[in-house]
Image: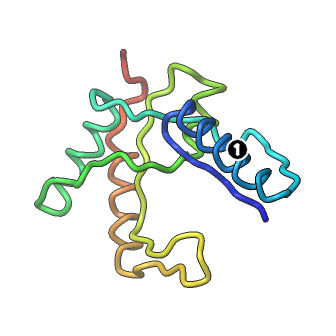
Amino acid sequence: IETSQRSFITSACKNMATTVRSVFELGGAEVQSNDGYPGWKPNPKSKILKIAMDSYKRLFGEDAKVKAIHAGLECGLFLAKYPSLDMVSFGPTIKEIHSPNEKIHIPSVEKFWKHLIDVLRNVPERIES
């Protein structure tokens, strides 16, 4: 059995991995762990987030739904290497992710693409901190 714990808080992910390990070891299983994804806690004052939100409003006439999710993302890997990087994560609508029933809402792909292109067009050459 292979498991993958993810969290935007690295310590919470490590705690969950320890709990999972303990449960499997109680059942006599041998457990191997890897580091997984480092945490990435989104910054609500992010300048790139504001650019993305303004873009969404301009394109679609409504406010973007901004939320943090429990998952660890590749953003944590980038942040580990480039600690001052300002990041935002967004994408098309995906349901039942990482399961045999995973589905992508096709119309949301076009919407995502338009948004991505507009965000890139509106990012200044350098965002001052």
At which x and y percent is residue 58?
Answer: 16, 54
The residue positioned 41% from the left and 81% from the top of the image is 106
- Label 1 sits on residue: 36
At label 1, which amino acid type do we have?
A: Gly
Q: Position of residue 104 (x, y in %)?
A: 46, 78
Residue 6 appears at what percent x and percent y?
57, 48
Residue furthest top as drawn: 129
Element class at badge 1: loop
Residue 29, by quadrant, is bottom right
Name the outermost residue toward the right.
Answer: 30
Residue drawn at x 31%, y 38% is 49
Q: Residue at x 80, y 45 (%)?
A: 33
Q: Quadrant of the N terminus?
A: bottom right
Is 33 rendered above or below residue 60?
Answer: above
**Residue sitting at x 36%, y 45%:** 68
Judge left or right: residue 46 versus residue 72.
Answer: left
